Structures are given as C-alpha cells and as structure tokens.
C-alpha cells in the first residue's frame, strides 16, 4: 500500500457496530488508544472488516484544531 497521507495509524479492529447505511469501526492502536471511524456498509463488506483484523486508520484533514480548558 502506498498513500500520500502522513497520518496513518495501524491497529486492530476492536469492534464493529453495523447500522442500516453505515458502520462504526473502532480501531485499537498499539498503545491501547482507540480511533473510531464511520464507513459505509459497502466499504465494510468490500474490505472484509471484522473484529481482530489488522487495519490502517488514515486521517486526512486540512486543519487540526487545538483546544485547552
């Protein structure tokens, strides 16, 4: 896999919650943190995503916001 995005997070699928149109996929990263993605049911099936599968969470954004208390 080659990709231009710089924010590529490798992990394992912790859980998948299927809806009528979309699925919520929770990825557990190496350090135990999680990242959640909403993908189409079509993508879920095409990529054969299920619990325990190794995947990449790819973040592509033009802005990263920072907040403090």
Image (spheres, grey):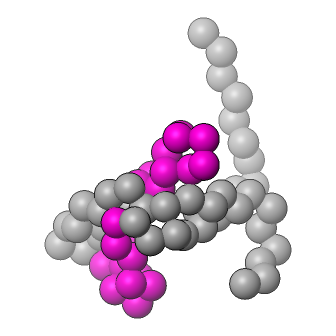
Task: Please say if 10 is above or below 65.
Answer: below
Looking at this view, name the residue that lies furthest to the left: 20
- The answer to whether residue 45 is left or right of residue 29 is left
- The residue sitting at 22% across, 67% down in the picture is 18
- The answer to whether residue 42 is left or right of residue 68 is left
- The residue sitting at 66% across, 22% down in the picture is 67
Task: Say if residue 42 shows up in the picture.
Answer: no
Q: Nearer the viewer, residue 31 or 69?
A: 31
Q: Which residues are magenta?
A: 26-51
Q: Nearer the viewer, residue 35 or 31?
A: 31
Specify the quadrant that holds the C terminus. Answer: top right
What is the count of numbered marks? 0
Looking at this view, name the residue that lies furthest to the bottom: 46
Q: Position of residue 28 (x, y in %)?
A: 49, 51
Q: Position of residue 10 (x, y in %)?
A: 63, 61
Task: Please say if 69 is above or below 33.
Answer: above
Task: Please say if 51 is above or below 69.
Answer: below
- The residue sitting at 39% across, 76% down in the picture is 49
Specify the quadrant that holds the N terminus. Answer: bottom right
- The answer to whether residue 27 is left or right of residue 42 is right
Q: Position of residue 16 (x, y in %)?
A: 30, 62
Magenta-span inclusion, residue 43: yes
Magenta-span inclusion, residue 33: yes
Task: Please say if 17 is above or below 44.
Answer: above
- The answer to whether residue 45 is left or right of residue 28 is left
Task: Say if residue 13 shows up in the picture.
Answer: yes
- The residue sitting at 60% across, 67% down in the picture is 56
Q: Position of residue 35 (x, y in %)?
A: 51, 49
Q: Nearer the viewer, residue 23 or 50?
A: 50
Q: Which quadrant holds residue 31?
A: top right
């Amino acid at each position: 896999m080659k990709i231009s995005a710089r924010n590529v997070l490798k992990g394992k699928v912790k859980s998948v919650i299927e809806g009528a149109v979309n699925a919520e996929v929770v990825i557990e990263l190496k350090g135990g943190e999680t990242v959640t993605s909403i993908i189409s049911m079509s993508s879920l099936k095409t990529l054969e995503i299920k619990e325990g599968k190794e995947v990449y969470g790819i973040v592509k954004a033009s802005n990263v916001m920072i907040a403090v208390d």
